[in-house]
Amino acid sequence: MNNRDVFSSKFGVIAAAAGSAVGLGNIWRFPYVLGENGGGAFFLIYLLFIFAIGVPVMLSELIIGRRAQKSIFGAFKVLAPKYGFFQSVGIIGVLTAFLILSFYSVVAGWTVEYTILALGNNLADKSPDQLADLFADFSNSIWRPIFYLIVFMGLTAAVVIGGIKNGIEKYAKILMPLLLVIIIILCLKSLSLSGSREGVLFLFRPDFSKITGNVVLVALGQAFFSLSIGMGTIATYGSYIKKKENLLQTAVSVSFIDTLIAVLAGVAIFPAVFAFGIQPDAGPGLVFVTLPNIFNQMAGGYFFSVAFFTLLVIAALTSSVSLLEVVVAYFTDELGLKRKQATFLGAFLMIVLGIFCVIYPKVFNGFEWTSSNLLLPLGGILISLFVGWFLGRNKVKDELEAHGGKAIYLQVFLFIIKIVAPIAIAIVFLNNLGLIG
Ligand code: TRP
């Protein structure tokens, strides 16, 4: 396996993994699910899940991937030939990638459409109501969303065919920092709007009476979704990471960057939501309806709207690439397809499923709900149990210390993934089924 493509530098590893994590999950999904689930209290629970469960699960995936030098499905075959059961993680992971990428590409298609609207200056001079109608008309139509879905999937396939060093890594390195700068500018503008204070309070002042079992489940699902964990994406990237990289540092940096961008997206959106009288629980259209209002109030709004939506397409692309990569790695490693064939096949199947998501909102919602709130946390349980109980302490230690440092946190890490994370996730599930609490 020495000829396996690898990331060329530490910055490249973090940029590519952060490129996978940072995407529509942070900028589109985080604000909208937070708005639907009561604001500040959701935010706190989300943060808790990111650091107490998300980071350890991400680290577990990196360990699995780098140890096995295989995509997630093959990884369990190599690492646990005796425990065939764990191969189900790989299978669930590939299926989850299909579900996520199909609705994800639909939303990414919306961002492509909005980039083009912004370019033609068609978002300018519209009232908040007109902007809401514009989104509703577009997202309820059929042909245009399907067209943009196909465009987006084509872009994703093009990057995936380029391979790791020349494809994913090259794009991620340059463009992620640029996106950060634009979001910060949007935050400043949003905070300066009159009436913005209420939005800040909505986001940062927890109202604990809003917490229900469902809110906790959605926060957990969002943490997994946003970090790209629970289905083997990060494990697949882990298989491309050199031994000299420090895996803990990678997991912490990626989680930190991911959380930062989600928080900044919240700060850009909620002050404006309240300033323009938009409903915080407006659902999946929230970002598309809110941000154009901010651009309309900004000096240089045209420039910023074009730049923002373009970068959002690219952020979505670095994430969709990582999802398609899971499927392609499976097709190439397990079915022996060539990279190109595997990519075309994967992209084609995703487009077909995506078309169902466009035509039937129930399919869209069902895919979104099942993947984030059920399959990813379930994958998380299995991944932590595997690394905690089955991989063997020595191998875990070996991976964590391969860069030459000492993993003084090993005990804590093992305690979390053996016990804390699986039990916490199981409790959230059971609570939602109404079995406890
Ligand atoms: N995390 C990405 C986002 O926030 C989406 C994503 C990419 C993902 N790969 C994933 C989600 C794997 C779950 C699992 O937009």
Image (spheres, rainbow, N blue to C red):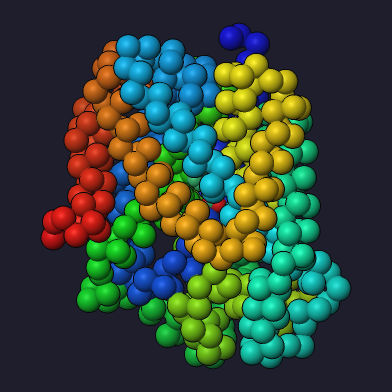
Q: Residue at x 43, y 15 (%)?
A: 77
The relative height of residue 185 versus residue 377 in the rendered view (above or below) is below
Q: Position of residue 91 (x, y in %)?
A: 46, 30
Q: 290 or 95, which is in the foreground?
A: 95
- x and y percentages locating residue 103 in the rendered image: 59, 55
Describe residue 46's horizontal placement relative to residue 335 as left or right. Answer: left
- Residue at image location 24% in from the left, 39% down from the top: 422
Q: Nearer the viewer, residue 193 or 390?
A: 390
The quadrant of the picture occupied by the C terminus is bottom left
Looking at the image, residue 379 sits to the left or right of residue 145; the answer is: left
Place of residue 259 in the rendered image (x, y in percent of width and height, measured from the top left): 45, 54
Place of residue 342 in the rendered image (x, y in percent of width and height, measured from the top left): 69, 28
- In the picture, measured across the screen, residue 395 lies left or right of residue 100, that is left
With respect to residue 320, does 410 lie above or below?
above
Foreground: 409 or 362? Answer: 362
Q: Is residue 78 above or below residue 24?
A: above
Tell which residue pokes out farthest to the top in this image. 2
Above or below: residue 423 compared with residue 59 = below
Q: Residue at x 43, y 52 (%)?
A: 370
Residue found at the very far right of the displayed protein? 120
Report if residue 80 is visible in the image.
yes
